[in-house]
């Protein structure tokens, strides 16, 4: 199995599990762990999509899934997503984030995995290019 395949599998796991696996691998094979990390696309990496790519992705994501996925994320990432939504949809997202009760971690991580899977499907169809840590994007 290649390090790209392992990275794809680990990208689908929750962050805590991925971090534990990579930390253990780092102790045993630091070069391999680095290669895997370089090929992983995490939820927060979606903020690096170009404007058109992010808008394409957001058209395919439900408001509820997006609101759950953005729980606990950095304000810069939330702002990046909001900035690529229509004014009405951005306001609704803001309200959902402010008024919704706390969400269980597994639900948040599931919503993030759903959005990443949607992004992968869009990439497979040639509608967007996912950012890669080993190949930085240039505007």
Image: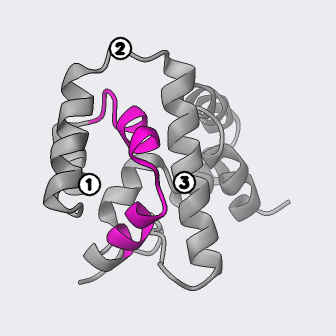
Q: Is residue 52 magenta?
A: no
SS at circle 2:
loop
Q: Earlier in the sequence, mark 2 or mark 3?
A: 2
- Quadrant for the C terminus in the image: bottom left
**How many labels sit on residues?**
3
Q: Quadrant of residue 40?
A: bottom right
Q: Position of residue 56 (x, y in %)?
A: 40, 73
Estimate the spatial distance between the alpha carbons at disc 2 and disc 1, rounded to whole Å: 20 Å
Q: Position of residue 10 (x, y in %)?
A: 67, 44
Residue on which the image places disc 1: 81
Give left or right: position of 123 versus 6: left
> Farthest front residue?
88
- Secondary structure mostly seen in magenta is helix
> Is the residue under label 3 in contact with that under label 2 (CB below 8 Å)?
no
The boundaries of the magenta stretch are 53-73
Estimate the spatial distance between the alpha carbons at disc 1 and disc 3, rounded to whole Å: 14 Å
Crowding at dot 1, Cα within 10 Å, few <14 / some 14-19 / many 20+, comes out as: many
Q: Is residue 60 magenta?
A: yes
Residue on which the image places disc 3: 116
**What residue do we see at 57% from left, 73% from top?**
122
Residue on which the image places disc 2: 102
**What residue do we see at 65% from left, 37% from top?**
13
Crowding at dot 3, Cα within 10 Å, few <14 / some 14-19 / many 20+, comes out as: many
As drawn, 119 above or below 139? above
As drawn, 43 above or below 22? below
């Amino acid at each position: 199995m290649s390090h790209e395949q392992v990275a794809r599998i680990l990208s689908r796991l929750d962050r805590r599990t991925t971090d534990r696996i990579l930390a253990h691998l780092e102790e045993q094979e630091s070069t391999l762990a680095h290669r895997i990390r370089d090929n992983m696309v995490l939820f927060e990496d979606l903020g690096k999509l170009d404007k058109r790519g992010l808008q394409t992705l957001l058209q395919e994501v439900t408001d509820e899934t997006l609101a759950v996925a953005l729980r606990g994320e950095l304000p810069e990432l939330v702002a990046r997503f909001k900035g690529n939504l229509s004014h009405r949809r951005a306001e609704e997202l803001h309200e959902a984030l402010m008024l919704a009760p706390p969400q269980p971690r597994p639900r948040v991580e599931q919503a993030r995995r759903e959005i990443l899977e949607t992004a992968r499907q869009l990439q497979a169809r040639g509608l967007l290019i996912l950012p890669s840590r080993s190949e930085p994007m240039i505007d």
